[in-house]
Amino acid sequence: MAVGKICVVGLGYIGLPTAAVFASRKIQVIGIDVNQNAIDTINRGEIHIVEPDLDMVVNAAVGQGYLRASRTPEPADAFLIAVPTPFAGDHHDPDLSYVEAAAKAIAPVLKTGDLVILESTSPVGTTERVAAWLAEARPDLSFPQQVGEQSDIRVAHCPERVLPGHILSELVQNDRVIGGMTTRCAATAADLYRVFLKGECVLTTARTAEMCKLTENSFRDVNIAFANELSVICDALGIDVWELIRLANRHPRVNILQPGPGVGGHCIAVDPWFIVSSAPEQSRLIAMARRVNDDKPGWVVDKVKATVADFLAEHPKRSIRDVTLACYGLAFKANIDDLRESPAVAIARRLMAEHAGTVRLVEPNLREAPAWLPGELLVSFDQAVAEADIHVLLVDHAQFRRIRPQQGRMIDTRGIW
């Protein structure tokens, strides 16, 4: 596929790196976003998220004229949709409104021969819905569900498979599963990704590609749930879970993951529910694993409260208002600034609401406090160490691995202290 211009809708943690990588290959890329601050930041050659080395790639692409950002889609040869797919309400049902809005935004500028790729992780059948939305908006063009291989517009699904903190290298090196609504759609999408991809393009159907991404993250979620459940059992039995897992993993066919305060992020904490919502009666294990991981933050909060009670028993002249808690880490995983679905945030917010004493929060990767967090509660590591009676490690950031509090009680949910 000859590509002169690419339009990437959504300039977040996946869309911006993808746009930047294409632009680094001397392809004209326009990125679309509803966040004016993100648009202005990118057009200055800067970035609005934390991701190693991305700032240099974006700066070079913008400076050389291959990348710019806008609110309005423009005609292009390929359109990539990389917008959020959050929950709708409190019942873990998928909210596809962002995907629908993106599809309807690009529809007016489509032309014969264009390629539309949904990168957003989505429930099975979403790519077909994108094609239906486009067909409804553009009855003058034909789509795969109407005429098959002879369609004017090619439509495919290609979910990302990258690790925050390593996105640029993994975008290039990892294999990509590419699901087309037809064989020709998949092949055309593969041709586009081969512009930068060193990994293999593996072609399949759109529905299989959608399910593949959900399956990958559900597999990890089930394994993390096993580790988290072990940590709760070991705490009740007086066993060091970190030593237990280390010993069990010496078995040649055992590889237990590490427990933590829960599971967060826009993938593992969300994607399994997309499977459950599509087939609730057939996905009992996946649903139970989700509940185990969703329950872990509450267990951590109870552990903190029990530690406060023990502390007060040892210091009878002090009241609970005199006890200062420090929570280390708010991101959903180490060495990033992403707070989406973070169990650390859930724990910190509950402690802020329920602890009668002072709570201090440490997150070295945040540039500014989020709206829900009073700025005075976000402090430096040194201040937290100096003030706190109880230290709660929630995220194993590199900064926390290098130094630990030398006094006070510690609750280590990541096993590094």
Image (cartoon, rainbow, N blue to C red):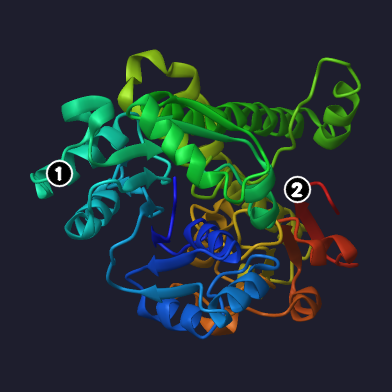
Q: Which mark is residue 141?
A: 1
Secondary structure, mark 1, is: loop
Q: Measuring 90% from the left and 25% from the top, which residue is drawn there? A: 247
Image coords of residue 40 (percent x, y): 43, 83
Q: Measuring 20% from the left and 54% from the top, which residue is drawn there? A: 107
Type of amino acid under label 2: Arg
Determine crowd level at label 1: few under 14, some 14-19, many 20+ residues with C-alpha closer than 10 A.
some
Image coords of residue 304 (percent x, y): 66, 53
Q: Nearer the viewer, residue 139 or 273?
A: 139
Q: Measuring 85% from the left and 28% from the top, which residue is drawn there? A: 244
Q: Splitting the image into 4 quarters, where does residue 134 fall?
A: top left
* Image quarter in which the N terminus is found: top left
Upstream in the sequence, badge 1 or badge 2? 1
Against 70, residue 392 (above or below) is: above
Q: Splitting the image into 4 quarters, where does residue 312 fall?
A: bottom right
Q: Splitting the image into 4 quarters, where does residue 399 fall?
A: bottom right
Against 275, residue 302 (above or below) is: below
Q: Nearer the viewer, residue 307 or 349?
A: 349
Q: Which residue is mark 2?
A: 414
Q: Nearer the viewer, residue 139 or 112?
A: 112
Image coords of residue 417 (percent x, y): 86, 54
Type of amino acid under label 1: Leu
Asked whether residue 394 is in view, the answer is no
